[in-house]
Image: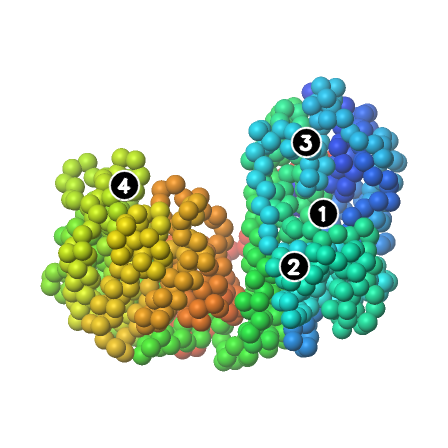
Amino acid sequence: MAADPRDRGARGTARQAATHPQPAATTSRPQRIAVIGGGPGGLYAAALLKRLDPTREITLWERNAPDETFGFGVVLSDETLGGIEHADPVVYAALQQDFVRWDDIDIVHRGTRYTSGGHGFAALGRRRLLEILHDRCRSLGVDIRFRSEAPDAERLAATHDLVIAADGVNSTTREAHAQVFGPHVATHHCRYIWLAADFAFDAFRFEIAETEHGVMQLHGYPYAADASTVIVEMREEVWQAAGFGEAGPQESVERCAKIFADALGGRPLRSNKSAWTTFRTVVNDRWSHGNVVLLGDAAHTAHFSIGSGTKLAVEDALALAACLAEQPDVPKALAAYEEERKPVVASTQRAARASLEWFENVSRHLDQPPRQFAFNLLTRSRRVTHDNLRLRDAHFTEAVEREFGCPPGTPPMFTPFRLRGLTLRNRVVVSPMDMYSAVDGVPGDFHLVHLGARALGGAGLVMTEMVCVSEEGRITPGCTGLYTGRQAEAWKRITGFVHAQAPGTAIGVQLGHSGRKGSTKLMWEGMDEPLADGNWPLVAASPLPYKPGSQTPRELSRARLSDIREQFTAAAWRAARAGFDLLELHCAHGYLLSGFLSPLTNRRTDAYGGSLEKRLRFPLEVFDAVRAVWPAERPMTVRISATDWAEGGTTAEDAVVIARAFAAHGADAIDVSTGQVVAEERPEFGRSYQTPFADRIRHEVRVPVIAVGAISSWDDVNSLILAGRTDLCALARPHLYDPNWTLHAAAEQGYEGPGAGWPAPYRAGGRRPQTGRTDAPRPRLSLGG
């Protein structure tokens, strides 16, 4: 199944095969090949390898009969079809005869249908796909053994040059050698069932049903002129409450048809030994063991909502065949295959995980304006974006923008946003970035140029680095502060420049205390490494060093807590006098206030430790004290780490409680970051990877949020804003690469409105310079002559 549209212009993969086979050039390449599993990936690998060298002896074992298969329809992207077309025109031609094609996606929510066009899908029945591959394998001379259990991979490996384990998500090969492959299997929160209807939907259809038991959703698409796949999905607790756990197979089918009677036009659903199941994401540390290699679902899975299972398996087969033709021996070929495919699969799995989690938490978005809800669903995986969707269906995207409140011709990122008495002209924030370039805590010319340049560059809000509230609260000797009048005067020089030379840009200060992560070297000399000399004593919630070799801090007494609270209020008072427009309290990344929030860093047994409510006490006391001296008309935000990315640490659920507490105390927005609390963290990096935490807080707490974390393009910003996942986007590295990032984003979108005004001296640069012609590189590999 594929619920995520693919780029229509893609025609081929990194591995393109030619139309004529070329025999293996050396005898070191595999001649006797065993394939375990007769799904599309295993069959296609067998056909490709036999076609490349007809002298090969290839045997494929499939435990089921030829016409037994799970599921109904298969959707393939243009990219995958391009690879098939180049590798085997015979298979491609047969597929072409049976494909059902369509362009639209329908989203039905609360009785209203919204349609987005221009997406370009192609589908056919899974049984028909297998028939085509069976025929191709037979015509090439592959020995297919149906209704036969394959010998175990270890036995096959002793008698074959190569063993391809395409034995699915429940791979016995993977489990038999788990100590080598290192599988990680995650079970998710929804139950789903694959069904079919004997009519063709006229679009890919998503329908949401709000029942007395909870939210259920239908994913449906045509795979033949008279048939559609229908997947019904719901969270485990909804499934239990609705009684599906006690219902028999036929009763489940009938009840699903009744719940989604409108979508089905009152028609029945049918089953193919269908059963409710829970999706499992499979990741493996390694994909090969000796001459045994995993392929398809045995190596990796990605949620059906982006339609990637068959696609990934087929692309695995293409890449494996290419590597075996290209490399001089099997070990090098398998290493090349894994090196090539792993990053591609990891990217797909990140997108699939985002899509899966969106559907798991669809109830969070039900109260969005209807078109925004539809846009949110379409862009849930982050692979379909605002710009991408605008090219496919400008009418739909413009309707979403109008509903959102975008003036004509104004991208979402250039709509204004108000926080208390401050109106930001656009949604772009220059994220706080430590520069480690101060002397005695005083910001100098470097800071003036650094922050001034980014203010001139068009962002709505420019944030300082973490400005320390005391000398002992510095991270490094190069950190800035606001604990002396001299420092305040230096900051006033910078805010004065921003207000005078970059009117319309606000400047905010982030106040913090390093806690146990202080007294370290400058970042480029050794991040988080203790100073070789000149160390100062550290304080923290509990006497725990940040990592082995770090200084052990003193646990703060009640008296010292009062002192630090006063240091924050004194710094806030100086910040107000220095002319900052916004103040952010830094309660993230393992610094002092963050150290109180996390159970991994707060082991106190007094009133400031234990339950989350108690761990919140000191950060809230500091917030209240700062809010009391910070001008009432100026906004305050709070940066938090929404997860520690470590077992036993702060969770996403905890982050909602933390955000709700700060909002109740008057925080105008929550700046949602993650991690950097403990050295042993295991973050799940990826594009916009922290955004789901902001999305959750925004919808559950009903407080404005700032999203951060690998947001790198203006298209990402537009997508996140228009989908309602965040209110503001903070970008760090893109602004180091390009201080004029926001102005360039406006120029590239042809926008010249008030959300991104060029400074008068820069107006001549308001159009993107012409560039020389660049041609795409030719594919470096052809699998034939």
Instruction: Name the residue that disc number 1 marks.
Output: 310
Q: Earlier in the sequence, mark 2 or mark 3?
A: 3
Amino acid under disc 4: Pro
Q: Which residue is drawn at the image coordinates 41% and 44% (left, top)?
A: 681
Residue 482 at x, y = what percent? 17, 61
Label 1's element? helix
Residue 693 in the image: above or below residue 114: above
Amino acid under disc 1: Thr
Is the Cβ of the residue at disc 1 closer than 8 Å to that at disc 4? no
Dot label at residue 240:
2
Q: Nearer the viewer, mark 1 or mark 4?
A: 4
Q: Earlier in the sequence, mark 1 or mark 3?
A: 3
Amino acid under disc 3: Thr
Along the viewing direction, whichever of 163 and 778 lies nearer the viewer: 163
Instruction: Name the residue that disc number 3 marks.
Output: 173
Crowd rating for badge 2 (residues with CA inside 10 Å; few <14, some 14–19, many 20+): some
Crowd rating for badge 4 (residues with CA inside 10 Å; few <14, some 14–19, many 20+): some
Label 2's element? helix
Crowd rating for badge 3 (residues with CA inside 10 Å; few <14, some 14–19, many 20+): many
Q: CA distance from mark 2 to mark 3?
A: 33 Å
Along the viewing direction, whichever of 6 and 63 lies nearer the viewer: 63
Dot label at residue 760:
none
Q: CA distance from mark 4 to mark 3?
A: 43 Å
Residue 508 in the image: above or below residue 20: below
Crowd rating for badge 1 (residues with CA inside 10 Å; few <14, some 14–19, many 20+): many
Instruction: Name the residue that disc number 4 marks.
Output: 545
Residue 1 at x, y = what percent? 71, 55
